[in-house]
Image (cartoon, helix red, strand yellow):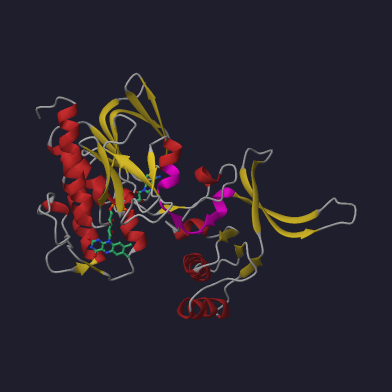
């Protein structure tokens, strides 16, 4: 049976890394699971190159930054420099962060929480959910969550193979451009298929120019407008494949004829946008409160907000939620009533949440460390 940790942390962004650092400092056994290749992958993926990182703090926030090591410098620096600062801390402190682990589920038995990822299962007394608010959408076909990439971590992986990129916007186009360029430089003539469920692709002018340039330089691209991912299946060699329908012909006898392509799922990248963490909270069975009848000032009408205690514990005992995952607001149970709590999506908030939740966990575990 695998080791029982005090704390498992899901996500290796500011909230997750700060939690790991504080657990280490207080001698709690912990493991952080990050889906990307490196800590802070969420920031690396979502900030444009060279973007200054501001140490923003809400005006009415009473506390200073409570995790100094991860605080962005007073004078804003480019995101690349901030990432360097953070990765130095991760390395120097030898933080226990396991990368390329995609969180999926939590089971509970007699007070022990078992976290399942696409690569394994891990046990702990407490779990901190720190996966931010940019949860990639899935294709919702069998096997997608496990096998289909949601971004471009390593372009080299696609050299020499027929690759399928799904999605009709700028981020899908960026992935197509990067793969075309890498293939061109490696003198690899295999095509990149670019599929979108509607008939038109929507990219901005600058992206279209870069794509046009790659095509004119010899990029082998096959456009698949109106193509719809249909099913995930395992072929007779045990390979998980995605079948994408590219044409449908309705017959007079009521039996439709399809044209479809089938790709190994490991050749597929789905860039179909991101969603808030609501669906994950629901899947985990955390209680959510719906903003109705003008109850919320920040949450939009009909939005469902996580219900948490003052110590960020959810309605599933031992599971805490912090950082961007509960921004821009959540419902706090306080002195017997439920109130909407403002929670700005900032590095400051993520770091300070981590501080408070690790304190709460130390208390709950009776730790005097
Ligand atoms: C373009 C942009 C600019 C910004 N600029 C600033 C700024 O200048 N100053 C500032 O204070 N704030 C800024 N912010 C906000 C700030 O980045 C966020 O508040 C902060 O990153 C939230 O930290 P987090 O750890 O909660 O979430 P994230 O940073 O999103 O980290 C979550 C981590 O969890 C991982 N993850 C997600 N799903 C899973 C899964 N299923 N399994 C395992 N791991 C998973 C992700 O890969 C990611 O690394 C900016 C945000 C954006 C988008």
83 left or right of 222 in image: left
Image spot of residue 307 (x, y percent): 32, 40
53 left or right of 284 in image: left
Where's ligand 1: which quadrant?
bottom left
Tell me the residue at 34%/47% (across/down). 131
Front-most of 89 and 150?
Answer: 150
Q: What stretch is highlighted in magenta?
A: 265-280
Image spot of residue 33 (x, y percent): 33, 41
Identify whether 369 is placed above or below 214: above
Tell me the residue at 34%/50% (across/down). 295
Mark yes or no: residue 326 visible.
yes
Tell me the residue at 14%/32% (across/down). 27
Residue that lies at the very extreme toward the front in this rendered image: 293
Residue that lies at the very extreme toward the right in this rendered image: 253
Displayed quadrant of residue 260: bottom right
Image spot of residue 275 (x, y percent): 44, 54
Q: Which quadrant: the N terminus?
A: top left
Identify whether 149 is placed above or below 165: above
Identify whether 236 is placed above or below 266: above
Is 239 covered by the magenta stretch? Answer: no
């Amino acid at each position: 049976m695998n080791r029982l940790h005090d704390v498992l942390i899901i996500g290796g962004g500011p909230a997750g890394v700060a939690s790991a650092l504080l657990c280490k400092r207080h001698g709690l056994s912990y493991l952080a699971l990050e889906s990307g290749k490196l800590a802070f992958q969420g920031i690396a993926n979502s900030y444009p190159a060279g973007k200054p990182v501001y140490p923003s703090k809400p005006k009415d926030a009473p506390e200073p930054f409570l995790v100094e090591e991860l605080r962005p410098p007073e004078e804003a620096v480019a995101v690349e420099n901030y990432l360097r600062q953070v990765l130095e801390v991760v390395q120097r402190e030898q933080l226990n962060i396991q990368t390329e682990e995609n969180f999926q589920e939590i089971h509970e038995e007699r007070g022990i929480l078992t976290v399942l990822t696409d690569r394994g299962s891990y046990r702990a007394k407490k779990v901190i959910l720190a996966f931010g608010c940019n949860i990639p959408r899935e294709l919702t076909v069998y096997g997608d969550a496990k096998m289909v990439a949601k971004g471009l971590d390593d372009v080299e992986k696609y050299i020499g193979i027929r690759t399928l990129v799904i999605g009709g916007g700028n981020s899908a186009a960026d992935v197509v451009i990067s793969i075309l360029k890498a293939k061109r430089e490696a003198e690899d003539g295999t095509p990149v298929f670019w599929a979108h469920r509607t008939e038109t692709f929507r990219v901005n002018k600058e992206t279209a120019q870069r794509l046009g340039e790659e095509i004119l330089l010899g990029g082998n691209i096959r456009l698949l407008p109106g193509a719809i991912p249909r099913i995930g299946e395992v072929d007779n060699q045990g390979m998980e494949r995605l079948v994408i329908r590219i044409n449908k012909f309705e017959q007079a006898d009521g039996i439709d004829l399809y044209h479809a392509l089938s790709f190994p799922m490991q050749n597929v990248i789905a860039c179909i946008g991101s969603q808030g963490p609501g669906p994950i909270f629901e899947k985990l069975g955390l209680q959510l409160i719906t903003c109705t009848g003008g109850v919320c000032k920040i949450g939009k009408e009909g939005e469902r907000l996580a219900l948490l205690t003052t110590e960020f514990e959810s309605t599933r005992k031992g599971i805490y939620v912090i950082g961007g995952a509960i921004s821009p607001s959540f419902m706090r149970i306080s002195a017997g009533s439920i109130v909407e709590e403002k929670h700005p999506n900032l590095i400051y908030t993520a770091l300070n949440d981590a501080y408070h939740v690790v304190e709460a966990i130390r208390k709950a575990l009776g730790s005097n460390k």
